[in-house]
Image: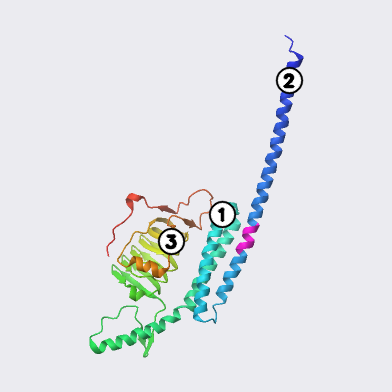
Amino acid sequence: MDVPVESGAAKMQERLQKRNQARIDSVERRNEDKESWTVSEEKSEYFSRNFQSEQASIEELLSGCCGAERTIVTQHLEEATTRTTQLQKFLNDSVLFLTQYELRKAQAALQKLQASLEESREEFLPKKKFAFRARAKAADKVQTQAEPAPPVPETVSTEVDGAAVVPEQCGFSNKSNDFITKTAEEIQKQDVLLTHLTNCKVRLFGSPSTLHLKHIDGCEILCGPVASSVFIDHCKNSTLAFPCQQLRTHNTTDTQVYLHVTSRAIIEDCHGVAFAPFTWSYPTLEEDFAVSGLNRERNNWSQVDDFNWLAAGKPSPNWSVIPDEDRRNNWDT
């Protein structure tokens, strides 16, 4: 049976239209891909330019601490801390369009910057503690005239060749199977160091300036609001609870962290770390929050960046959220 000429022509015309539309669609897709790549490249250049500029500005602030008066040093360190936190957020917001090389490079630079910040804080600020210890020692001498002096706590200065030697940080070290505490008066916004503790329960009341935990095994450590950063290194099988501005955790395994943090927590070389909101409470907690300057309403406890995990869109296997039913709400004091 013969096919009508008009019908055959119509089908031919339809096929030509489909091919033409396919070519148009292909061209549009290529143009979109090219445009997307161009936008991504522009974003990358924008990030690199601004990240390096801000990094240099923060390094200049830290350099300005050398030889400066304590007031100036404090201002520089506070500004450097705030800007470093903002730089971390800028990096977090840019992860989606950065290459793995760019991301690793920026993370390494930020890590170095944060280390420099802490080194500057420890180098230029602890000197003020000598005056505090001198006043405390003078007060103790007056007290001994009226009544026997209480036992000397571990953080009070010791005597070497007749001269007072004040530790750079208060805290505890080399203890096992012990229940130990620090009061707000003992801490007085100092840097607190806990190191080489095994199977201990620790309660830190008040507001430390920074908190350093090193070589912790099987411990339960609860701390009041930390004004700046908490640094954890080589911790295992432990339970920790504290509010802070920044958290950096290294070489830590099988540890629960009850956290209030105003920036984003960072882990590196860790696994089996679990997070939940901070739940410890004690009578002067709200006063200590005010002393620390932390934002009570801002808690990014579940916003964790793993420097060993760069797979975009996939959660890191090295940390998790503690299920509601497994979280602790009651603590021994």
Q: Nearer the viewer, residue 324 or 290?
A: 290
Using the rendered view, name the quadrant where residue 213 is placed. Answer: bottom left
| Amino acid at pointer 2 | Ala
Q: Which residue is mark 2?
A: 10
The percent coordinates of residue 220 (x first, y second) are 33, 63
Using the rendered view, name the quadrant where residue 253 is placed. Answer: bottom left
Callout 1: 10 Å neighbours few (<14), some, many (20+)?
Answer: some
Q: Nearer the viewer, mark 1 or mark 3?
A: 3
Q: Looking at the rendering, in which quadrant would you find the C terminus?
A: bottom left
Q: Residue at x 72, y 25 (%)?
A: 15
Using the rendered view, name the quadrant where residue 285 is placed. Answer: bottom left
25 displayed left or right of 81: right
Residue 317 in view of the camera? yes
Q: Which residues are magenta?
A: 45-51
Tell whether position 48 is magenta. Answer: yes
Residue 268 in view of the camera? no
Element marked by disc 1:
helix
Q: Nearer the viewer, residue 208 or 158?
A: 208
Report the predominant secondary structure element of the magenta stretch.
helix
The percent coordinates of residue 133 (x first, y second) are 37, 83
The percent coordinates of residue 191 (x first, y second) are 41, 73
Image mark for residue 95: 1
| Amino acid at pointer 1 | Val
In the image, is residue 324 above or below residue 172? above
